Every structure is written in structure tokens, then in C-alpha cells.
Image (cartoon, rainbow, N blue to C red):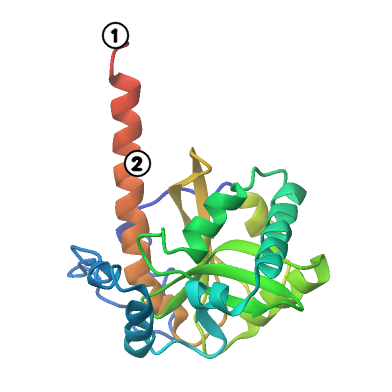
Amino acid sequence: MKETPIINPEEMGPDFIKSEYEQPDYSNYEPPKENPFIEDMDNEEDGIEDLEEIENLPEGMINTIKLAKSLNPEELQKIYEWYSSAMDRRDREPLEYDRFCYHFFEGASWEPTYAMGDMEKGFVFGFYKHEIFIPTHFAPKTMKGGYSIFKELADNKELPVASAVTDDLAKTLLKMKGWHKLKIGFLAYFNSELKKKTIIYNSAEGVRTKLIGLMKEFWDETKRLKKEQQEIETTPDV
């Protein structure tokens, strides 16, 4: 696979948005200046209810705190084991059990997290913003179940799905019909290590147009991380 360049979205040119879509104008896009869910954190139950009503979650998607409340401890342990096994198969270091549960099931993430799947096939966890589901963690019960989950996401015409993944995972998913790749990359931390990520997305109607706001956030984060890295490299040892 060719190396994916790290590019400013403004430099992508006309090939980014194909002719069947109007060229979006993202020049005035501004991400939220503060977390809109902070006020709900003191009252977790009410916050989740209000969030679902506001977001109008797509069919099959559930807030991960509500998911945890619907399962018993043994089932939560199994989900973590599925996630850990999937990471091991890719020679990746999984989150520790307590950290995984704290992030997804106890509201530690600064943004609400969501899940899709079930105990028969497994789950995919992530965020839902800009009307796009953004998978970040994967817990398939079996390899067959994992394929089924990603195939369903790829073929979903109603739910836009996009994710920033490492090149090796992008190569695997692109073998599956329905997934596409942007000719652009971003920087992100992966287990405390700075990595280059590739953007893949499914075949939902209008997904490329919806990606604009998401990519602006990715690009802003890339600029911040590059600046941070440069400052570290140029700071003399004391």
C-alpha cells in the first residue's frame, strides 16, 4: 500500500469531493468551543436521556453507559476479552480492563461514547458526531463475527461511518467491498505513541460531504500534535 500523505484538507483539490456531490464550503466551520455535555455529568442518568433525544441516535446504536447497565459483570468481562484478543491478533497493546471500562462504561471519555453490535457477534465502540459514527475500539466475539459487523457498517446506506485507522487495518478493511479510503492522513496518539492514521469511510449517501467537519477537527489535532512534537524535539535537555 502506498504511504498516505499528511495533507491539509484545503490542499485536497477537486478529487476529494466527486462530481456527484456539491463542493462543500468548510471555511467558516468552527468546532464547539466547549464540551456541550459537561452540564449533564453530575446527573449521569438524565444526561444520557437528554443526549439520546437531542442526537436522535440511529437504529442499533446505544450509549455505552446504558449498554453496560443492560449487561451483567460476566458479559462486560467477555466484551473486554474479545477486545483484548482482537488487539493481540494485530500485535497491539490493549487497554487494561479497568481503563477500558472506565472509558466506555463509566463515562470517563470527555465525549459520549456509543456502541453497535450484540453479544452474538460482538461490538464496535466509538463516537457519533457530525452525523457520522466513528469507530475507535473493536470487540468481535469471533473473527467471523468481526467480519460481519464491519460488513454491515460498510453496506449501511443510512448511517455514515468513518474512522481514522492505522495503515495495516486500512489495508485489511479495503479488501471488503463498501469501504473507501481518503487520499489524506492525520496524526493521532495510539497507546501513547504518535501514529499516522488513514481515513476510511463507508458507502452511505452523503458521507463524503459530512466528513468535512470531522476532517477539520482531525487536521486541527494534527497541527497541534506536530507543533507539540516540534517543541519536544527542539527543547534542550536540562
Residue 131 visible to an observer of this rendering: yes
**Chain-order first, disc 2 or disc 1:** 2
Q: Residue at x 28, y 18 (%)?
A: 235
- In the rendered view, tell whether residue 72 sits above or below residue 59: above
**Residue 199 at what x, y percent from top left?**
51, 61
- Other residues around mark 2 within 10 Å, as few (<14) / some (14–19) / many (≥20): some
**Residue 66 at what x, y percent from top left?**
50, 78
Asked if marks 2 and 1 touch (Cβ < 8 Å), the reply is no
Residue 204 as seen in the image, left or right of residue 82 = left
- In the rendered view, tell whether residue 195 sits above or below residue 48: above
In front: mark 2 or mark 1?
Answer: 1
In the image, what residue type sits under mark 2? Leu
Q: Nearer the viewer, residue 49 or 141?
A: 49
Q: Which residue is mark 1?
A: 238
Q: Quadrant of residue 110?
A: bottom left
| Quadrant assignment for the C terminus | top left
Q: Residue at x 78, y 73 (%)?
A: 145
Q: Which residue is mark 2?
A: 225
Q: Quadrant of residue 212?
A: bottom left
Report the number of discs: 2
**Residue 175 at what x, y percent from top left?**
73, 66
Residue 97 as seen in the image, left or right of residue 160 = right
Q: Quadrant of residue 139?
A: bottom right
In the image, what residue type sits under mark 1? Val
Q: Residue at x 48, y 48 (%)?
A: 5
Q: Residue at x 63, y 76 (%)?
A: 71
Q: Secondary structure at mark 1?
A: loop
**Residue 219 at what x, y percent from top left?**
34, 55
Label ID, residue 97? none
Residue 174 visible to an observer of this rendering: no
Q: Nearer the viewer, residue 206 or 18?
A: 206
